[in-house]
């Protein structure tokens, strides 16, 4: 059993946005322009942090990435996303940008993290790769928690949410909300999203959020339905199945307190092996 400080909660609400988008496959410039518009809209609604879908900047098309690793991947502090860094600074908002990232000779499915001053402060690489991703992409055991307004925001990417130990490791390190950039397709993908994210919320008595594509990306027909779940696993925001839209939710820390008074699974859980998941915390200003 671990020592979870169940009485340590944020002191104010956190406003999050999910940028449910339709990506143009292989067109980073156009996808950046669309993302800018979403960040602008979120900023005008006083959102604290906005999340985009998995591999949004290129579309979810591994063959495109493989065909040209220079043109169809992003490097850290890449000039092609300077417009997004400027948007975050202008509107004082954090952003989680889903994209393939190249570092050295390796390529990762990543979330680039931009803070409210427009600086790239970190990157999270997908921990659990789907079978079809393993030929191209690398992974590691480095996990990321971002601290914003006393909220600890844990990073996940799609398939990660299907492994309970992933969000559990973050929750054991103080995570209050688990945010997953995703690509879920119609059919089984939709079912997975509706099982995994509410389960991870209830498992850990934390908020969870998932941001999905809509429309076609590569061979996938995305199911939309980006969502937010409260710490008891109830869906509180549900996106359209086929429309690009900005979804906004205000997370109340009082719900964390209420949930943990009644549900003790986090407090009663065994400690996750520290070698399996190495946690890095990024503290916002």
Image (cartoon, grey):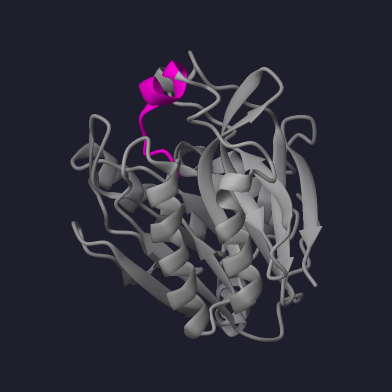
Q: Is residue 5 left or right of residue 58?
A: right
Q: Which portion, as a residue range, is magenta?
A: 57-67
* Identity of the residue drawn at 67% across and 17% down: 105
Q: Nearer the viewer, residue 95 or 270?
A: 95
Q: Quadrant of the C terminus?
A: bottom right
The quarter holding residue 9 reads: bottom right
Count numbered badges in the picture: 0
* Identity of the residue drawn at 75% across and 43% down: 271
The quarter holding residue 66 reads: top left
Q: Nearer the viewer, residue 7 or 75?
A: 75
- Image: 79 above or below 179: above
- Residue 183: percent from the left, percent from the top? 36, 42
Is 58 contained in the magenta span?
yes
Outermost residue, top side: 135
- Image: 80 above or below 16: above
- Residue 170: percent from the left, percent from the top? 68, 51
Q: Is residue 144 left or right of residue 226?
A: right
Is 193 contained in the magenta span?
no
- Residue 55: percent from the left, percent from the top? 45, 40
From where the camera sits, is residue 229 visible? Answer: no
Q: Is residue 91 left or right of residue 195?
A: right
Q: Nearer the viewer, residue 217 or 251?
A: 217
- Image: 249 above or below 176: below
Q: Is residue 66 left or right of residue 11?
A: left
From where the camera sits, is residue 189 visible? Answer: yes
- Image: 223 above or below 152: above
* Identity of the residue drawn at 79% across and 30% down: 275
């Amino acid at each position: 059993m671990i020592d979870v400080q169940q009485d340590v909660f944020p002191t104010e609400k956190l406003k999050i946005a999910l940028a449910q988008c339709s990506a143009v496959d292989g067109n980073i410039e156009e996808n950046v322009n669309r993302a800018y518009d979403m960040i602008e809209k979120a900023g005008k609604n006083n959102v604290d942090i906005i999340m985009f879908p998995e591999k949004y900047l290129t579309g979810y098309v591994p063959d495109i990435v493989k065909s040209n690793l220079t043109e169809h991947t992003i490097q850290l502090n890449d000039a092609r996303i300077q417009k997004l860094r400027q948007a975050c600074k202008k509107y004082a908002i954090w952003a989680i940008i889903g994209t393939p990232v190249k570092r050295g000779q390796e390529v990762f499915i990543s979330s680039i993290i931009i803070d409210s001053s427009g600086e790239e402060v970190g990157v999270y690489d997908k921990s659990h790769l789907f079978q079809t991703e393993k030929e191209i992409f690398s992974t590691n055991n480095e996990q990321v928690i971002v601290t914003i307004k006393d909220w600890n925001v844990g990073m996940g990417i799609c398939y990660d949410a299907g492994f309970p130990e992933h969000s559990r490791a973050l929750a054991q390190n103080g995570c209050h909300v688990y945010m997953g950039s995703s690509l879920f397709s119609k059919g089984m993908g939709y079912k997975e999203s509706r099982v995994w994210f509410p389960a991870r919320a209830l498992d850990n008595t934390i908020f969870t959020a998932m941001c999905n594509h809509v429309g076609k990306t590569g061979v996938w027909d995305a199911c939309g339905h980006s969502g937010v779940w409260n710490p008891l696993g109830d869906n509180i925001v549900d996106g359209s199945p086929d429309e690009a839209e900005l979804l906004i939710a205000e997370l109340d820390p009082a719900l964390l307190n209420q949930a943990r008074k009644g549900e003790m699974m986090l407090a009663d859980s065994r400690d996750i092996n520290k070698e399996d998941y190495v946690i890095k915390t990024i503290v916002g200003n």
